Image: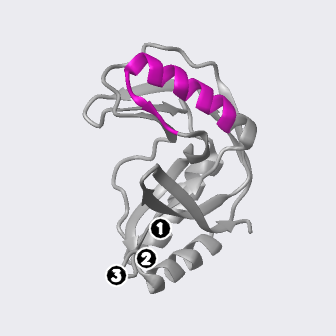
């Protein structure tokens, strides 16, 4: 926790180990071809809602929001690569969003709004950030990667000398 007691938090999906390994291999290919820095395998995730800095009572409120959401497992198919020049990043995304994921994001956004948290106005687009500091589009194809999603988490990010490290605060189902 920072000196002022705040944590940098977000809700996320964590693809299963097999899919994350395949995403990491695709991220490495993208990093090589985009002259960027690939995201470590352990950090590959889909952000559902970024909250930002939150203190103890807010984190407890976020836990209650997560616990109130009904979750049904689903599969995601990562099948497209997108280069974002302005953000100097490459992500691997999904051409279609499963209804279960759309419902999860909708419930999450509703719960956040009711509790006074900021809610992203843009439509949700499921993706994992694969490369940071990309200098150019990678010009690679990705073979479809199917991921089993069996829950979602409330996460905290830590900035360290070696890079970002994520810590699970809570998850649903537990």
Find out whether the residues at labels 2 and 1 contact each other: C-beta distance under 8 Å. yes
Query: Which residue matches tag 3?
Result: 4
- Judging by the rendered image, the residue that carries numbered circle 2 is 114
For residue 102, above or below residue 67: above
Image mark for residue 32:
none
Secondary structure beneath dot 3 equals: loop
Direction bottom: furthest residue = 57
What percent of the width, then of the height, locates residue 16? 72, 44
How much space separates mark 2 and mark 1, taking CA atoms?
6 Å
Residue nearest the viewer, comparing 5 with 71: 5
Q: Is residue 100 above or below residue 152?
A: above
| Mark positioned earlier in the residue sequence (3 or 1) | 3
Residue 97 in picture, x, y percent from top left: 57, 39
Residue 108 x %, y %: 52, 64
Extent of the magenta region:
20-39
Q: Main secondary structure of the magenta part?
A: helix
Question: What's the distance in space between the residues labelled 2 and 3, CA to CA?
Answer: 26 Å
């Amino acid at each position: 926790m920072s000196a002022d007691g705040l944590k940098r938090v977000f809700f996320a999906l964590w693809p299963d180990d097999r899919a994350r390994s395949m995403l990491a291999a695709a991220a490495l290919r993208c990093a090589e071809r985009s002259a960027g820095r690939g995201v470590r395998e352990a950090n590959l995730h889909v952000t559902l809602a970024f909250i930002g800095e939150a203190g103890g009572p807010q984190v407890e409120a976020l836990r209650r929001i997560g616990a109130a959401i009904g979750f049904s497992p689903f599969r995601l198919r990562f099948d497209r690569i997108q280069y974002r020049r302005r953000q100097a990043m490459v992500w691997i995304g999904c051409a279609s969003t499963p209804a279960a994921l759309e419902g999860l994001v909708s419930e999450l956004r509703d719960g956040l709004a009711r509790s006074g948290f900021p809610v992203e106005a843009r439509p949700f687009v499921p993706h994992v950030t694969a490369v940071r500091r990309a200098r150019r589009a990678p010009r690679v194809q990705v073979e479809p990667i199917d991921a089993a999603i069996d829950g979602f988490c409330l996460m905290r990010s830590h900035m360290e000398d070696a890079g970002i490290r994520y810590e699970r605060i809570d998850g649903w189902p537990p």
